[in-house]
Amino acid sequence: VTERTLQGFRVAPGGSLRGRVRVPGDKSISHRAIMLGSIAEGETTVEGFLEGADALATLAACRAMGVSIEGPDDGWLRIGGVGLHGLRAPAAPLDLGNAGTAMRLFCGLLAGQAFDSVLTGDASLSARPMRRVIEPLTAMGAEIDAEPGGRAPLRIRGGRALRGLDYAMPMASAQVKSCLLLAGLYASGETAVTEPAPSRDHTERMLEAFGCRLRRDGQRVVLGAERRLRATRIVVPGDLSSAAFLIVGACIAAGADLVIEGVGINPTRTGVLDILSLMGADIELRHRREQGAEPVADIHVRSVRLSGITIPERLVPLAIDEFPILFIAAACATGTTVLRGAEELRVKESDRIAVMAEGLVRLGVRAEATADGMVIHGCDLRDDPHAPVFDGGVIDSHGDHRIAMAFAMAALRARAPIRISDTANVATSFPGFDRLVTRAGLGLEVLDEGSGAPA
Ligand code: S3P
């Protein structure tokens, strides 16, 4: 997973998005399904699992700790849960590739094991901050060594007696919250986490589906004494973070009319829909239903004239992965869009503020990066609401899947082709992106960057 192949996209200007599509399974839920299924008692089945590199790294890590997992077969898995204390020492370091969620959640899960373990990742993951989990885990009694600056590889010492902690998180991070709840499964006493603002709650929902008791009180969640996980059946909804590229694409492309089926609409994830609605988007949620522990709907989007807004800060953690594509939407909107309070974007798979500002400016958009957000000056399109707004050009994704997919969608409103380099990591969250968007109407071609020829 850490190898980077030379792959790029060339996207023809114009086109539209039409028809009905289905996006791959939710990445956050797929990671959690493997981890919780592995430490549950009995056989857990999973449907709709994301067969992307990130979730597959989690799957491989659990196998390396002795869990037998059948599949994945078209999103289907059977996990032979080994129980809370059944994991075995891995023979080698666990390589988590590009997956921040895997590293932070495993850190909590492994801090409570009887054996030592080492977590490694690719260059991007090895540059991301891990102190945010190491510090509270250390306060619980864990022993974790990191590289200078609190970076991976992380060496986790086993056989430590963990104590429950009452922790107030300095940032709204579902990864930190989930890490501590997983460590809490192995700790004496109660573990409580308070977040400054709501973040995605898939771990809490899934722990409950496995039979754990949680108490929630506003922004505080407490893991109770019932810690046994009993196997269950998990149906993973389509990933709203992947659907977001198509949703924005259908907002900005002339003549678009697209339905994305079976997408998770957990209210701790739907900030992107709220922000686009404030910008004037025409989005309809149809056939709302519950799928296991998560709400799901079909999302119908039609093209529209968007307006710039000041993004309400309370929506930032609820849309944290969607800002690359929301910046593309803002560039296509009339007036100015302002984002503040989003400094977390600087420590994602890339510095998404710097990398998006660089790309937008390169394509002729007036965008200014700020310490904690961005100001994007949209366009005045009174005559033709879908006139091109982006110049053609070459974009460096910095190996960040969401940057690559965001600029691919920009081509829908470009004057000339957009070429994006370093796109192999799109497979971390959205395998088959190129085929799916091509079928919906985007003129995307995959290139072998070595020669510049189609792959
Ligand atoms: C995730 C939480 C978020 C998000 C990431 C997935 C999760 O990260 O950006 O893509 O699955 O818990 P933070 O917890 O760092 O905000």
Image (tube, grey):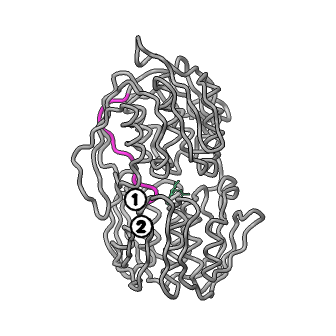
Q: Is residue 196 above or below residue 231?
A: above
Q: Residues within 10 Å of mark 1 (few under 14, many from 20)?
A: many
Quadrant where the N terminus is found in the figure: bottom right
- Residue 114 image-quadrant placement: bottom right
- Foreground pick, 190 / 26: 190
User: Residue at the spot x=53%, y=82% of the render?
Assistant: 164
The residue at the far right in this view is 148
Label for residue 33?
2
Residues under numbered marks 2 and 1 in contact, where contact means CB atoms less than 8 Å apart: yes
Q: Which residues are magenta?
A: 17-28
Image x and y of residue 228, in percent = 39, 84
| Residue 239 in the image: above or below residue 303 | below
Work out which quarter of the rendered image holds the C terminus and state it: top right
Determine which of the numbered discs, if any, sits on residue 49 in the image. Answer: 1
Q: Position of residue 2 (x, y in %)?
A: 64, 55
- Residue 82: mark: none
Percent from the top left, x then y, of residue 45?
34, 69
Q: Amino acid at mark 2?
A: Ala
